[in-house]
Structure formats: C-alpha cells, structure tokens
C-alpha cells in the first residue's frame, strides 16, 4: 500500500484505549480543543494520531501511537462530533511542534513500522502464520471466557492475520501498559509472542489463585 502520509500530525491523547492498525475506533468528541482538531482534520487530509497518555504525569505521552483516518463524521444537535477512525499504521514521535492551536502536533516517522502498510510479509509463510494465530486465538478464547467476554469468533476468523492479532490485542482484558507493549512490538511475530506471554501470565495467575482458595 502506497500512501502519502503526513510527517506532522495532530495528536489525540487518550487514556484507556490503545489503538491498532486495521481496527475501527468510534469516538465521541465533545471537548472544544478536540472539536477544533477534528474540524481542522476534515478540512485537510483527515489523518489524526491516537496515542496513550502516561499515567501520573502531566502532558507526557508514549513515543509510539497509531495513525488513524476519519471515515465517518456526524455532528449532533448538542454540538458533539461522532467520528469513526480506521487504523492506518503505527508511528514514532520525533519532536513536538510549537503551534498556536488548542491541540498538540508532533513530527513523526513511520520507518519502524513499514510492515503495517503491507509492504512486506509479516508472518513468514502462510502456514506458519496461520498456526501462530490459531494457537494464540485458542488460548484467547479460554481467557475471554474466564473473564466473561464475548466475541463472534466466526466473524473473527474472516479477518486477515494482522487484523486478528491487532483486534485481540486491542480488546483483551489486560492492562493499558501491556497493550502499549504489544503496540510497540515491531513485527507481527513479536506482537503474537508478547500477547501470548501476557495471556499465559494471567491464566497461570488465575489457576494459582483458584488452587490457593481450595
């Protein structure tokens, strides 16, 4: 995929939501500064950077986020904007841009995450990739069930390999910091490995706690 991606992007810091490429993110925008951000984006290229704010710090954000493109934009009667973003690729912050706007802008690079745009096969051979995805999917099914989460697995299987691992990482009941670790894992193989290790930790922790109670 060849895209003319912007090197300077507006940033929407968001706690509690880690956004991945090839996933959809609906947002309800009501703060004046972010209403201004969305309106400016709609007048230009519709690109916006989603990134996680660091906890217990003032204005500090992680260095890795995800670039999204606005695909839907609806204004409500009370002035809110309902938008939908489609994840394009991850980015790495280089430097913050001084501006006179109400929202922040950063110069970014996409070099580390070229695989997000499908320029290189990220899972190796198809058989190997499918086996890895199937293994972590089966493990995740058990993990989700234990946490009372429902997922339409039949529809999930229709996604491509990268969409599957990104979707699982985005909705899994794990901490924001753990999701950020997955987001920062460059290759699909490393994302699968990290997610698998995190799920293993929670599964073993649950098993240990249950056995201790008994």
Image: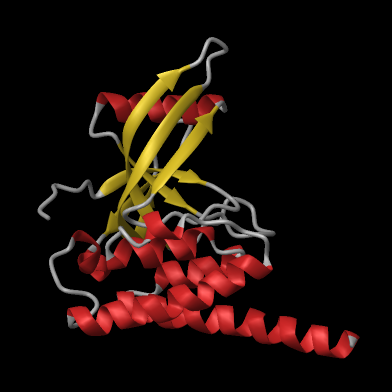
- Residue 190 at x, y = what percent? 37, 81
Report the quarter where the N terminus lies.
bottom left
Quadrant location of the C terminus? bottom right
Instruction: Tell me: residue 212, above or below residue 22.
Output: below
x 25%, y 63%: residue: 116
Residue 100 seen in the current view: no
- Dividing the picture into quarters, in which one does residue 209 lie? bottom right
The answer to whether residue 185 is left or right of residue 146 is: left
Percent position (x, y) of residue 188?
Answer: 31, 74
12 relative to 176 in the view: left or right: left
* Residue at figure coordinates x 62%, y 58% from the top left: 149
* Residue farthest top in this picture: 77
Specify whether residue 173 is in view. yes
Scheme of colours in the image? secondary structure
Residue 96 to residue 112: above or below: above
From the viewer's perspective, tell me whether residue 89 is left or right of residue 64. Answer: left
Asked if residue 202 lies left or right of residue 32, the reply is right
In the image as oriented, which residue stretches furthest toward the right?
Answer: 214
Residue 165 in the image: above or below residue 213: above
**Number of labelled discs?**
0
Residue 24 at x, y percent in the picture: 39, 45
Q: Residue 210: x, y in percent?
A: 81, 83
Quarter assignment of residue 40 = top left
- State the residue lying farthest toward the left: 2
Looking at the image, residue 56 lies above or below residue 41: below
* Residue at 60% over, 53% down: 16
Residue at (24, 78) in percent of width and height:
123
In front: 62, or 86? 86
């Amino acid at each position: 995929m060849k895209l003319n991606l912007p090197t300077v992007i507006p940033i929407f810091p968001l706690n509690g939501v880690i956004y991945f490429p090839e996933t959809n993110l609906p947002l309800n925008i009501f703060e004046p500064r972010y209403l201004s951000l969305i309106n400016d984006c709609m007048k230009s290229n519709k690109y916006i950077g989603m990134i996680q704010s660091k906890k217990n710090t003032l204005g500090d954000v992680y260095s890795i986020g995800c670039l999204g493109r606005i695909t839907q934009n609806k204004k409500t009667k009370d002035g809110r904007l309902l938008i939908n973003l489609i994840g394009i690729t991850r980015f790495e912050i280089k430097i913050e841009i001084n501006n006179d706007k109400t929202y922040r802008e950063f110069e970014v690079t996409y070099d580390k995450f070229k695989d997000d745009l499908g320029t290189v096969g990220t899972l190796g051979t198809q058989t190997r990739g499918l086996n890895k995805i199937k293994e972590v999917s089966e493990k995740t099914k058990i993990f989700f069930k234990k946490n009372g989460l429902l997922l339409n697995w039949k529809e999930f299987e229709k996604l491509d390999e990268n969409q599957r691992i990104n979707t699982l990482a985005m909705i899994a009941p794990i901490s924001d910091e753990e999701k950020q670790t997955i987001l920062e894992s460059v290759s699909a193989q490393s994302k699968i490995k990290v997610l698998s290790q995190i799920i293993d930790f929670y599964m073993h922790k649950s098993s240990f706690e249950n056995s201790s109670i008994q």
